[in-house]
Image (cartoon, helix red, strand yellow):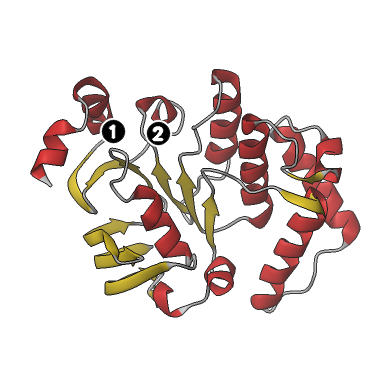
């Protein structure tokens, strides 16, 4: 589903991604782990089309289509979703309004009709209930005054509502206590399917206790330096990243 070949990317004058190659087949969950500054978040921003991240070489495709040739909103309409490490606050825009606008924009880009207000509210209530989100929160400005855990749950709610085909979770576990982590992980696991894939970016094994990956990759110095099964995450937890950082 996702194919990255020898990708290189700069932030300003500094090269961060340095010849990264990765394949994530349909239906699989792959985890990327690595030290601070390795390029994990940069990779997520490059794939989703954030401004200020310049691709200088290589390729990235989703379902055989060139991702890098598309604008950020077009990538989203193709089914690419990023859960932010630090979700933004948007004063004055109720969460429900934001999510419905995003959903209808994607439906329009795919040639589909808008979702009706009653149908949208029914879906929003159901998904919010699954994530233990008070529906009244959805009437408040998006993420304004929310705790870290509430912001992360709001990201997963957006994911559930938009129903993307490829999910990138950028350190979704950061700032979560154990109860919030379990709720977020349950929301992610609820959308796993043979037609949907995920890239889970994390520093720690604890998230992978709840979101079981098919493959684990180590990213160091801008490229994948090791890959393995779920046991690789346990090795990293026990030994740290030093050995892999030296290999990079």
Residue at image location 36% in from the left, 38% down from the top = 213
Whether residue 141 sits left or right of residue 53 in the image: it is right
Whether residue 231 sits left or right of residue 194 in the image: it is left
Quick one: which residue is furthest to the front in this view?
A: 13
Whether residue 27 sits left or right of residue 182 in the image: it is left
Residue position marked by numbered label 2 in the rendering: 212
Pointer 1 with pointer 2, Cβ within 8 A: yes
Q: Position of residue 34 (x, y in %)?
A: 28, 39
203 or 60: nearer the eye? 203
In the depicted structure, whether residue 97 falls above or below residue 142: below
Q: Position of residue 111 (x, y in %)?
A: 68, 79
Q: Residues within 10 Å of mark 2 (few under 14, many from 20)?
A: some
- Quarter of the rendering containing residue 52: bottom left
Q: Which mark is residue 96?
A: none
Whether residue 147 sits left or right of residue 80 in the image: it is right
In the depicted structure, whether residue 1 falls above or below residue 208: below
Quick one: which residue is furthest to the right in this view?
A: 118
Q: Say which label, 1 or 2, has the lower sequence index.
A: 2
- Quarter of the rendering containing residue 56: bottom left
Residue at image location 38% in from the left, 62% down from the top = 1
Residue position marked by numbered label 1 in the rendering: 230
Residue at image location 59% in from the left, 69% down from the top = 77
Q: Position of residue 43 (x, y in %)?
A: 36, 56
Q: CA distance from mark 1 to mark 2?
A: 8 Å
Give the SS element for disc 1: loop
11 or 229: nearer the eye? 11
In the depicted structure, whether residue 28 falls above or below residue 98: above
Q: Position of residue 243 (x, y in %)?
A: 12, 33
Work out whether residue 26 can be spotted.
no
């Amino acid at each position: 589903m996702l194919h990255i070949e020898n990708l290189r990317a700069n932030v300003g004058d500094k090269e961060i991604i340095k010849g990264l190659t990765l394949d994530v087949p349909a239906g699989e969950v792959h985890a990327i782990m690595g030290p601070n500054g390795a390029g994990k978040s940069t990779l997520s921003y490059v794939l989703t089309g954030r401004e200020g991240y310049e691709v200088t070489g290589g390729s990235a495709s989703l379902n055989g289509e060139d991702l890098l040739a598309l604008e950020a909103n077009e990538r989203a309409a193709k089914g690419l979703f990023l859960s932010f490490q630090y979700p933004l606050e948007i004063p004055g825009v109720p969460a429900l309004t934001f999510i419905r606008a995003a959903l209808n924009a994607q439906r329009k880009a795919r040639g589909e009709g808008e979702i009706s207000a009653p149908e949208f509210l029914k879906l929003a209530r159901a998904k919010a209930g699954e994530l233990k989100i008070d529906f009244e929160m959805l009437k408040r400005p998006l993420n304004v005054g929310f705790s870290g855990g509430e912001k992360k749950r709001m990201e997963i709610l957006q994911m559930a509502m938009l129903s993307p085909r490829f999910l990138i979770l950028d350190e979704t576990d950061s700032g979560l206590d154990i109860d919030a982590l379990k709720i977020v992980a349950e929301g992610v696991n609820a959308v796993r399917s043979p037609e949907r894939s995920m890239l889970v970016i994390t520093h720690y094994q604890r998230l992978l206790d709840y979101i079981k990956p098919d493959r684990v990759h180590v990213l160091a110095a801008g490229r994948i330096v090791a890959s393995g099964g779920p046991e690789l995450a346990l090795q990293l937890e026990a030994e740290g990243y030093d050995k892999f950082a030296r290999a990079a």
